[in-house]
Image (cartoon, rainbow, N blue to C red):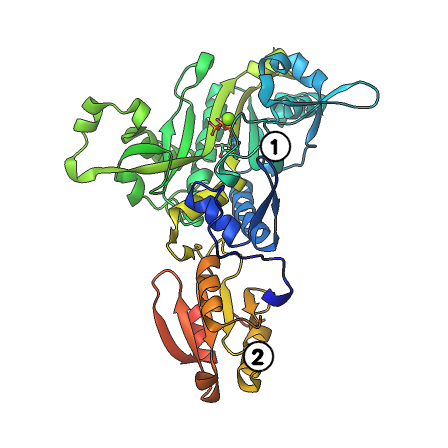
Amino acid sequence: MRLSQSLIPTIKEVPSEAQIASHRLMLRAGLVRQTAAGIYAWLPAGLRVLNNIADIVREEQDAAGAQEVLMPTIQPATLWQESGRYEDYGKEMLRIKDRHERDLLFGPTNEEMITDLYRQSVKSYKELPQAAYQIQWKFRDEVRPRFGVMRGREFLMKDAYSFALDYAGAVIIYRRMMLAYMRTFQRLGVKAIPMVADTGPIGGDLSHEFIILAPTGESQVFYDAAFEDVDYGAGNFDIDKSEDLERFFGIMTGNYAATDEKHDLDAWGKVAEDRRREGRGIEVGHIFYFGTKYSAAMNFSVTGPDGQKLFPEMGSYGIGVSRMVGALIEASHDEAGIIWPDSVAPFKVGILNLKQGDAVTDAMAEDVYGKLRKVALYDDRSERAGVKFADADLMGHPWQIIIGPRGAANGMVELKRRATGEREELTVEAALAKIGLIAN
Ligand code: ATP
Ligand code: MG
């Protein structure tokens, strides 16, 4: 994209309403704009990040055997009356009446709706187990929306739901989802620690929250270095092999991890000193097994092998896709701005034309842009070099190709790596080869 013709409104001043780095940087880098309390419009650069994250989440959900669906954001109250949650959910639920005075709501989550969809069509044990997911907007009327997209009222969530015939089947899907989550976070370039979470009235230990490490995170976390040593990739674990899932789950649950609220000093003391890690973290995902809570309440049963009716054992699995944008920035930024991981950057490369209007730099910049059209943001504004340097650092492109009149006259550009600040003078071809991008 050409920055001169783009809705990427960078701002120099620090917005006074933003209390945390990611919120400030998302506004300053022109990724989002607030339209009402806790409700944001995603501008082109922000949307590219959101889509890149969603694509990685989607690939890993698919690889885990879940099928993608898209349910509506507006739901009928009747479904929630069946499960009993219409009253229980309280003020976080945005309730709406249509012109016929029918009660509707903007979905805060989708257990009821997915159970209804399965109930309509799945009748036999032969059709299970199954898992389905969507990446869809949710609305929760949070009392205190804050920290930008980290706690919004409208937010994008990946929510998956699983149906199995028995507890053993539910556990396999649960473990598979957990591995899919660790892979997702690994690909997003962040360290994530799964923590045992409260399961409420259902009990058991099948609920985990996923905390990603960021120095400015809300909670203090204590964990064993084991989580950092594991490669979650397909080379190490085959997601379709139950023995691999068992080995994976053993590592996830056999090593110490806790937030400050649940920190157990005795157990912590037993972790070898050189393996103790401490940091701050942000919750980005949550997975649950909840048995037949919804299938029984909503009377979704299938015929079992012996002809008896049975209620499927369910689980649900969330990742805050829009919260992840803020969390990634919390995990990766400096004074100058965002430092995007390569896998999610809105633009892999920023092209800086330091002397817009100069025939030689213009020609070279246009040529480079022509080769990198899909992955580059070309700063072709008639701004001072200093402004372009500052904005490129603020926007956080992993690479910058800096084109000035002196270098251009000799066929040279400067290549800067945002994460390290390293710069070197190269030919265009050498710069492209170093970035590893195929011209298109
Ligand atoms: P929290 O304790 O932060 O309110 P939750 O327990 O209500 O989260 P879940 O219902 O498990 O969250 O939702 C799954 C994921 O959706 C969370 O892990 C989080 O990443 C994201 N999420 C939840 N509420 C919000 C929100 N208000 N804004 C942005 N993301 C959210
Ligand atoms: Mg909540």
Circle 2: element type: helix
Please say if 27 is above or below 147.
Answer: below
Tell me the residue that label 1 is attached to: 138
Q: Residue at x 70, y 32 (%)?
A: 72
Q: Is residue 98 left or right of residue 259?
A: right
Q: How far across and down, in percent of the image, does residue 38 sit? A: 57, 35
Quadrant in which the N terminus is drawn: bottom right
Quadrant in which the C terminus is drawn: bottom right
Q: How far across and down, in percent of the image, does residue 295 sit? A: 60, 16
Give the amino acid type for the residue marked by disc 2 in the picture: Asp
Circle 1: element type: strand
Residue 376, quarter of picture: bottom right
Please say if 185 is above or below 387.
Answer: above
Tell me the residue that label 2 is attached to: 367
Q: How far across and down, in percent of the image, does residue 410 sit? A: 45, 89
Q: Residue at x 49, y 41 (%)?
A: 17
Disc on the earlier residue, 2 or 1: 1
Please say if 101 is above or below 107.
Answer: above
Please say if 55 is above or below 225.
Answer: below
Q: Nearest the camera: 290 or 383?
A: 383
Residue 199 in sight from this viewpoint: yes
Mark 1 and ligand 1: say if the CB distance to the nearest ligand atom is below 8 Å. Answer: yes
Estimate how packed mark 2 is, as few (under 14), some (14 to 19) or many (20 or more) residues with alpha carbons within 10 Å: few
Q: Nearest the camera: 166 or 405?
A: 405
Estimate how packed mark 1 is, as few (under 14), some (14 to 19) or many (20 or more) residues with alpha carbons within 10 Å: many
Q: Residue at x 31, y 33 (%)?
A: 220
Dot label at residue 294: none
Mark 2 and ligand 1: say if the CB distance to the nearest ligand atom is below 8 Å. Answer: no
Residue 299 in sight from this viewpoint: no
Give the amino acid type for the residue marked by disc 1 in the picture: Lys
